Amino acid sequence: MPPSPLLRVGKATGTQRVPTLDLRGLVPITRPLEAAIDPALCRTCTPRPRTRKAPWRSVSGEVVVTHAAGEQATAELRDVSTHGCNVLCEAAWLRGGIFVSIRLGDEAPLQAIIRWARSGRCGVEFLRPITPDREQWMDMVEGDDSW
């Protein structure tokens, strides 16, 4: 394998060769590194836009979150859309990537996945969007506070 143009083999030390960096021909950076990076190639240069699949509504309510292994926790529902919700819960087992079910009132639970969890808050994506037959959920999404 031919050596890299910037890496050449240095002095032999016993049976080992120690690589040394050849800095000849390199141009020193005279401007901030951020200015030298093409933003189109760097995800950290431009913030990721906050996108959601559907409009959401700030709410306040109580739900029961159940882990696929059976552990349960009561959580405070903070916002909701037809595709997911945000809950406040201190359960230690809540972390990103786990499957849960979320039950609101006496309705059948919705199956979901925790997308992120930090500082007791969780972003939850429903595996299927809320449908009109889920009356309590739809009331919350549409802004009917009679639930």
Image (cartoon, rainbow, N blue to C red):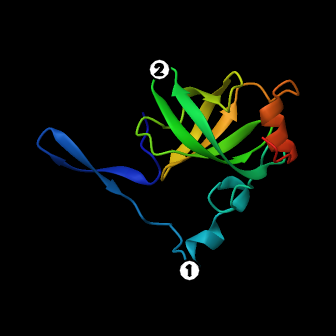
Which secondary structure, mark 1? loop
- Residue 30: which numbered mark, if any? 1
Farthest-out residue, front: 146
Measuring 49% from the left and 35% from the top, which residue is drawn there?
Answer: 73
Give the vertical position of 50 relative to 106 (above or below): below
List x then y, in percent, for residue 124. 64, 38
List x then y, in percent, for residue 95. 48, 38
Relative to the observer, which residue lies in front, 143 or 121?
143
Q: Amino acid at mark 2?
A: Gly
* Callout in the foreground (1, 2): 2
Q: Are marks 1 and 2 in contact (CB under 8 Å)?
A: no
Label 1: how many Cα within 10 Å (few below 14, some 14–19, many 20+): few
Q: CA distance from mark 1 to mark 2?
A: 59 Å
Where residue 101 sits, quadrant-wise, is: top right
Residue that carries the numbered disc 2 in the rendered image: 70
Quadrant containing the C terminus in the rendered view:
top right
Horizontally, is 67 left or right of 145 in the view? left
List x then y, in percent, for residue 44. 62, 58
Relative to the observer, which residue lies in front, 57 or 133?
133
Q: Amino acid at mark 1?
A: Thr
Label 2: how many Cα within 10 Å (few below 14, some 14–19, many 20+): few
Measuring 53% from the left and 44% from the top, which residue is drawn there?
Answer: 117
Give the vertical position of 25 relative to 128 (above or below): below
User: Is residue 11 something that shows in the picture?
Assistant: yes
Which secondary structure, mark 2? loop
User: Is residue 53 something that shows in the picture?
Assistant: no
- Residue 136: which numbered mark, if any? none
List x then y, in percent, for residue 112. 65, 28
